[in-house]
Amino acid sequence: MHFRRIQALQRKVKADYILICSPENLFYYSGFTGGEGTVLLGKNERLLFTDSRYIVQAKQEAPDFEIKNVAEQKVSQFLAEKKATSIGYEAEFVTAGAYLRLCEALPGAVWLPVDEEVLAQRAVKDAHEFSMTCRAAELADEAFTKVLPMLKPGTREKDVALALEWEMRKNGAQGASFEIICASGVRSAMPHGVAGEKIMEKGDFVTLDFGCFFEGYASDMTRTVVLGRATEEQRNIYETVLRAQKAGLSAIRAGITGKEADAAARSIIEEAGYGENFGHSLGHGTGLMIHEAPTLSPRSEKELSTGMLVTVEPGIYVEGLGGVRIEDLVCVQQNGHLNLTKSDKELLEL
């Protein structure tokens, strides 16, 4: 699996060596989870540089790589000895200081950013990545079902967030894929209102946005409920978001641009008079990170491809009243999509 990924990258990036050092890409190309290290990919070489804390782990997780201890030989020394004249590197990850030190050690070398090629490769998932994400989505769905009885007046937002993470972890998740959002009442008007000390009250919207990592891959889902009977305004907002979300889902297929998918959902919200209350994009890709390529936004001209995993999450946020967001994680297919999020989306009045 890793060898195929390496070959695909090397076909796109013509360089003596490709230097990979972000934790996610270390795992993607080598299987190493230590986090601190550097992979060097040459024409017939696969090397993993790390320190003594991770040598044994690196040998176990990356058996097809030559493992080097940075205390004995640094990456820059190796490249200098090899007289490398062109090196691909992650420009969006390597710090300015590290880049300057590499340039000093390799005067005259050409440095080629590989970020775009790597992100494009990671955007399309293989069967293993799809399977791991499906399980992560299942764990989130199961946790939502478990915590529903907690959603009632008198419950603290933080307690719901803790319960969600516990439910996911005890069933196999490595942890939450981002800081869990549990926002109730007027706080639900904040799209990223992470769980706080607020006590839920009767009549509140409660928005839960959460997910987990399973074997390195992230899930992401959002559901909004009402505590008690919804008012006419609350019901109108919820039904508008639900129609927009369904329209966005219907648009998802291979060949559509992120801009077109976003417009399918956004037009519903705009027609209902809430255009100014939907400030974020329709969705984003997930994978080894909770946010990665592609994006579903008004500015995204790139087409979706079969095998991409994207969220579809429109929302309406009214300051002083509250907000609604509904989010599913889906896999792009040739003529549509496969929804990995199974939790009910009809308005729940608890």
Image (spheres, helix red, strand yellow):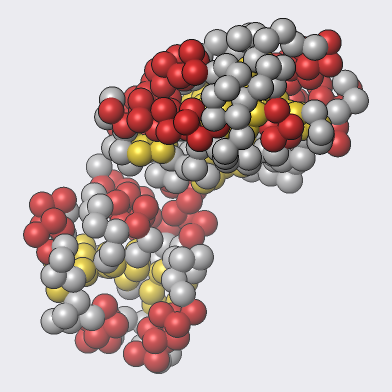
Near-viewer residue (196 or 332): 196
Q: Is residue 321 visible?
A: yes
Q: Position of residue 89 (x, y in %)?
A: 42, 69
Near-viewer residue (256 or 189): 189
Q: Is residue 284 above or below residue 34?
A: above
Q: Is residue 235 above or below residue 219?
A: above
Q: Where is residue 133, by image quadrant? A: top left
Q: Is residue 97 above or below residue 322?
A: below
Q: Position of residue 28 (x, y in %)?
A: 32, 49
Q: Give the residue drawn at x 45%, y 14%.
A: 145
Q: Where is residue 175, by image quadrant? A: top left
Near-viewer residue (61 or 176): 176
Q: Position of residue 274 (x, y in %)?
A: 86, 28
Q: Give the residue drawn at x 21%, y 68%.
A: 50
Q: Is 232 positioned to the left or the right of 120 in the image?
A: right
Which residue extends farthest front? 154
Q: Give the residue drawn at x 81%, y 36%.
A: 319
Q: Give the residue drawn at x 52%, y 44%.
A: 291
Q: Position of residue 102 (x, y in %)?
A: 38, 84
